[in-house]
Image (spheres, grey):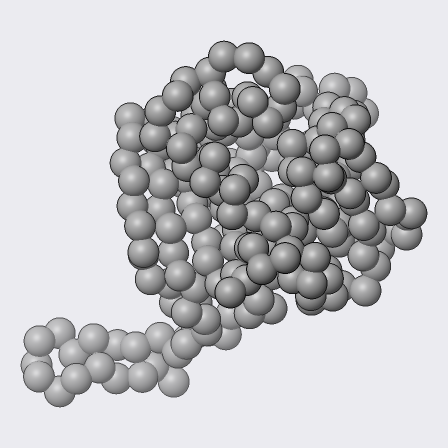
Amino acid sequence: MTKVTAQLSVSLDGFYAGPRFDGDGDWMESAESAAFFRVTRWATEASAWRERQGFAGGEQDVNSDVIAESFGAAGAYVMGRRLADGGEIPWGDEPPFRAPVFVVTHRPRQTLLRAGGTSFTYVTDGVASAVEQARAAAGGKDVAVAGGGSLVRQVLKAGLLDELELHVVPVVVGTGLRLFDADLDLAEKEAIELTPTRVIPTPQVTHIRYAVRGRAPLVLDDRGRGGGPTVIR
């Protein structure tokens, strides 16, 4: 059965990149880039990631196995326009996805066909449409929401995400682009419930997989008085 999944590397304080870079100049020299590459270092050093990029070498370890598993599970991808535009040149003629990619955007563009089975289809009628098109193209495999973090929040907010995997890196970056933010539009006494289904600790990163249970009212524990939980309204 096709699941909609997302995964993101985050710092211990919840950031997936540094402060957003919108100016002129080289993004690679920005604070956004510095924090992004710090929290994804575990991945770029892994042999499975490097092989997908066409690079040699890398570590063949548990982290590499996690990456290989995620590539193998995905039958289609959904991503934001900023990520797609930023990756177009670095990914080259044979991007690492090797599957259909559906790009959520407000700016139409013809589908890009690339070598290795990757295509980029630009979807202008919203996140739900992109996810639905990806489901149809996934061939029974998972739909992977590739990011960035804003898109992951949109999919989570819409109730479309089945599984979230966080790769928590033991570093505190202090500020930047935060995965979980106020634009989830949760009510004052509402939460999104998740259940951990797998935890893999390594010295570089801890991989935590969650099943997304969805929105629920916050419940006040009775602090051991025996009366049971109380829904906070």
Q: Residue at x 31, y 50 (%)?
A: 198
Quadrant of the rendered structure where residue 17 is? Answer: top right
Q: Residue at x 29, y 45 (%)?
A: 199
Residue 142: percent from the left, percent from the top? 55, 55
Quadrant of the rendered structure where residue 171 is? Answer: top left
121 relative to 231, above or below: above
State the residue lying farthest toward the left: 225
Q: Nearer the viewer, residue 62 or 222?
A: 62
Q: Residue at x 41, y 76 (%)?
A: 216
Q: Residue at x 13, y 87 (%)?
A: 227
Q: Nearer the viewer, residue 19 or 107?
A: 107
Q: Nearer the viewer, residue 23 or 55?
A: 55
Residue 201: percent from the left, percent from the top? 28, 36
Residue 28: percent from the left, percent from the top? 67, 20
Q: Does any portion of residue 208 appear in the rendered image? A: yes
Residue 124: percent from the left, percent from the top? 83, 59
